[in-house]
Image (cartoon, rainbow, N blue to C red):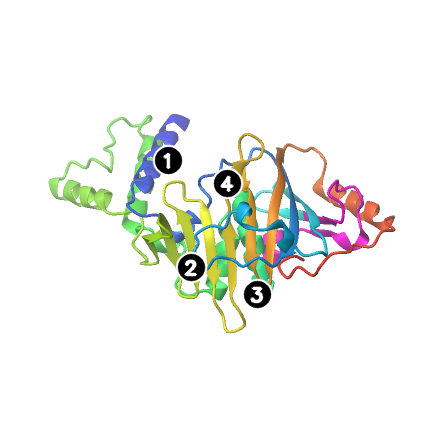
Amino acid sequence: MKRYLFAWLTLISLVTTLNAAPTAEGLFRNVSNKETTGNLIVVTAQIEEFAAPIKENSLIQTTQSIPEQEVQPDGPVYVKWLISIERERIVDVIQVLYNDPQMKKVSSAGVRYFPEFKKMMKNDSSIERSLFYALFMMLTLNDSELVGSVMTKYAQGYIPNKELMSREKINLYYRYKEYLEKRQDDPSLVSPLEPEDEERAKQVQEILTTPMYRDANNVKLVRFDSELAWLVDVKNMQAYFSNEMHRLKRLDYQSPLGDIRILFDDYVLFNGTHELPKTVIIKDMSQKSWKLRFTGLSHLNSSKAFTERAKDYAEAAKGATEALLTPSIPFLF
């Protein structure tokens, strides 16, 4: 039975892969990264404000292009995120802010526990926070759900894959799945992909040769800064992805209240398997620029309940005597 189901899933995957152009949702699934390998993901980063200008016509902004003297004197903020995926389809998050790069001194103001994180973010009123954490979930979990929610709420023209899929094709695959499940008990069954009726066989071939997704006309291959890139254009939001690996390189958002620009540097492996961009540069709606440098990434299998882990951090924060001296970062809680 498992062999037949695997064959069915492989067929769907193959046909989907052969589509000429990716969809917006497909690009935001971060397919260049490996799937998660544990129930606890730990990410660390350093964030600081800087005054260096961001190139208007650059697809990426490398860390080498940021002069060290342009970093603001307030000093960096050090962040640790613990992401739990131990509950099916539910993401819980602990966020801890530090003043020191060793991340040993916990401040009471720096510990936040977010159960059912995605549900909470879908109701958040800040586009800067919503967009940042949506992209963070995309990069760390290969999850496009929050990005789709942000696009639907703030952009125009985003259409999820389920609304683009060919219903005829999906129905045909479901009938093929049922055929694979039943044919070992009834060898006389005829595959719905190879009907005996000539007219029906012609219809099936037409269905099989049509794309899995209809074209939403919001993704196209463009040349940007001498590079080929996939552009997702949903009116007031544009995202650029590398041509071959489909890595997110740049995102622009425009609104009457202000614009946001986010640039992603080269992607690097952190644990030998999973990748993150080395640096993310964020120009917020007030046009302040921030440099986020990822410093660590671990995928772990933990037997400790995440609620207990959250209590431990809360207890450590209660005994903290040092104040959290950080600049106000608009895209962080």
Q: Name the residue nearer the viewer: 197 or 295.
A: 295
The amino acid type found where label 2 is placed reads Gln
- What residue is shown at x 12% (from left), y 40% (from top)? 198
Relative to residue 10, is residue 105 drawn left or right?
right
Label of residue 9 in the image: 1
Identify the mark nearer the N-term, 4 or 3.
Answer: 4
Q: Are marks 3 and 1 in contact (CB under 8 Å)?
A: no
Which span is picked out in magenta? 94-121
Q: Are marks 1 and 4 in contact (CB under 8 Å)?
A: no
The CA distance from mark 2 to mark 4 is 20 Å
- What residue is shown at x 72% (from left), y 56% (from top)? 74
The amino acid type found where label 4 is placed reads Tyr
The CA distance from mark 3 to mark 1 is 47 Å
Q: Residue 174 in the image: x percent, y percent?
A: 33, 41
The residue mark sitting in front, 2 or 3, is 3
Q: Residue 49 in the image: x percent, y percent?
A: 64, 56
The CA distance from mark 2 to mark 3 is 18 Å
**Which quadrant of the figure has residue 17?**
top left
Q: Return the residue at label 3.
A: 287
The amino acid type found where label 1 is placed reads Leu
Q: Is residue 86 visible?
A: no
Please determine whether, in this image, residue 128 is positioned above or below residue 195: below
Asked whether residue 98 is drawn in magenta, I would say yes
Identify the mark nearer the N-term, 3 or 1.
Answer: 1
Q: Could you say whether the residue bearing mark 2 is in a helix, strand or loop? A: strand
Q: Return the residue at label 4.
A: 267
Label of residue 166 in the image: none
Q: Return the residue at label 2.
A: 238
The amino acid type found where label 3 is placed reads Gln
